Image (cartoon, grey):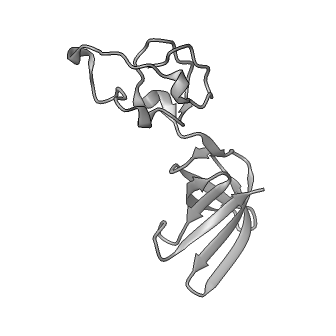
Amino acid sequence: MPSHDIARGTVITENDVATKAIATLRMNDQLIHDLDDIVGKEAKRALRAGEPLRLSDLKHPTLVAKGATVTMVFEAPGMSLSAIGRALAEGGEGDTIAVLNPTSYRQVVAVVTGPGTVRVGAGGPSPKTNAIATAK
């Protein structure tokens, strides 16, 4: 649980969290039990000190902003293609977002893999065929 009040959008560090024993009756699947599931995440809403944290309270930090111009790169064995696109949603690492190709007005589904970076592929991401888009 937070050791002090945490503002919405704040990335949580170990210093922001305290542990406290809770009655088993108050526990449920939505409560976060492990420090590793908290540290490095971003608060979706203002968090009050002493309140148990739920999975719905946190998200991966935003690495791709909605409306950001991105360079989409499709890579396959022996081939690499690139095009400019625009992120239609914000996303954190592992989040799935849509990216618009402004030339064709087609949307592609992409998985955020790093700051300003997403991976897409024909029929979804796969180890053999993927694409990367980097925010500009």
Where 6 sits versus 104, above or below?
above
Where 47 sits versus 134, above or below?
above
Q: Quadrant of residue 135?
A: bottom right
Viewer-closest of 65 and 24: 24
Q: List x then y, in percent, for residue 36.
A: 43, 37
Q: Quadrant of residue 29?
A: top left
Q: Residue furthest right?
A: 136
Left or right: residue 12 versus residue 86 is left
Q: List x then y, in percent, for residue 97.
A: 57, 51
Please give the name of the residue rendered at 46% of the width and 72% of the height, measured from the top-left corner.
Answer: 127
Q: Residue furthest left?
A: 25
Please give the name of the residue rendered at 41% of the width and 32% of the height, measured from the top-left corner.
Answer: 35
Where 45 sits versus 4, above or below?
below
Q: List x then y, in percent, for residue 120.
A: 56, 65
Left or right: residue 94 versus residue 82 is left
Q: Quadrant of residue 37?
A: top left
Left or right: residue 2 versus residue 91 is left
Q: List x then y, in percent, for residue 20.
A: 36, 16
